Amino acid sequence: MNDTFKTIVKASKETLFKERGSKFFGYAFPVLSEEDIKKALESLKNKHPTAGHFCYAWKLGTETIHFRVNDNGEPKNSAGMPIYGQLQAFDVTNILVVSVRYFGGTKLGVGGLAQAYKYSAQITLEASEIISKTIDVVYEIKFDYDLMNKVMQIIKDHDLKIVLQKLDLKCEYHIAVRKKSVQQVFENFEKLYKLTITKLE
């Protein structure tokens, strides 16, 4: 079972590609929602108030993929799709790649534009720190204090990540379980008397 995906955890360095007078500034951002995408695009529009085109592609999700491409006034499929093609080539998700163009006075034609935007996206992704992450499922476990040592042992044995910890009258943990370990971890916790385990959406 493949339970890993590739992404970036921080924004890339700015890249610059020049083609017959036009300048293409490239950026990659880690994103988890359309709200993140909106904020990143707004920040670029503030940074480049006189640029002619903000062309981009984004991809969200690990098992169910959502994506969008935007030519932002360039001829249809000459910008957004070539950028998205590079997201596919680098096999990354939860990412937004934007190429900001300043027109240099010479028209590049649809083919020339597609090549320029593809290359801008390529060098931007090459300048990004791409990492592999696991696809995790988050569970809530509730238990009494007398089970703490046993619970902590399971967490240690499976190298689980504690996302949230509440210690009140009862103990409540939210734990991230790697997808391929879900069945085994779930069974180990279920064996503990008076512990409840619930999958969180």
Image: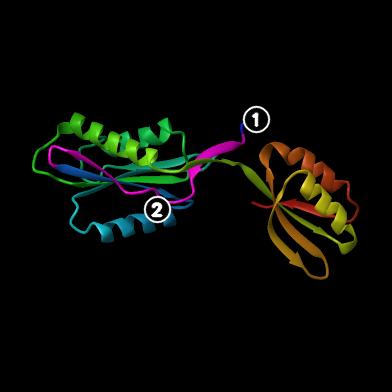
**Which disc, if any, is residue 37?**
2
- Return the x and y of residue 195 as percentages of the image width and height: 85, 55
Q: Is residue 150 magenta?
A: no
Q: Earlier in the sequence, mark 1 or mark 2?
A: 1
Q: Amino acid at mark 1?
A: Met
Q: Is residue 108 visible?
A: yes
Residue at the image point whose x is 72% and y is 48% from the top: 160
Instruction: Find numbered disc 1 in the image and state the secondary structure of the residue it sits on.
Output: loop
The quarter holding residue 196 reads bottom right
Residue at figure coordinates x 86%, y 56% from the top left? 149
Q: Seen in the image, is 159 located left or right of residue 48? A: right
- Relative placement, left or right, of 79 versus 90 is left
Residue reaching furthest to the bottom: 169
Residue corresponding to mark 1: 1
Q: Are marks 1 and 2 in contact (CB under 8 Å)?
A: no
Identify which residue is drawn at 36% across, 32% down.
Answer: 85
Image quarter hosting the N terminus: top right
For the question of whether residue 63 can be seen, the reply is no
* Residue 96 on image: x %, y %: 39, 46
Near mark 2 (Cα within 10 A), the count class, few <14, some 14-19 or many ≥20, is some
Residue 28 screen position, x and y as percent: 38, 46
Residue 171: which quarter of the image? bottom right
Image: magenta residue range: 3-21
Q: Is residue 24 above or below residue 167?
A: above
Residue 80 percent across, percent down from the top left: 30, 39
Viewed as shown, does residue 11 lie left or right of 148? left
* Residue 19 counted in the magenta span: yes
Residue occupying image coordinates x 38% and y 38%: 126
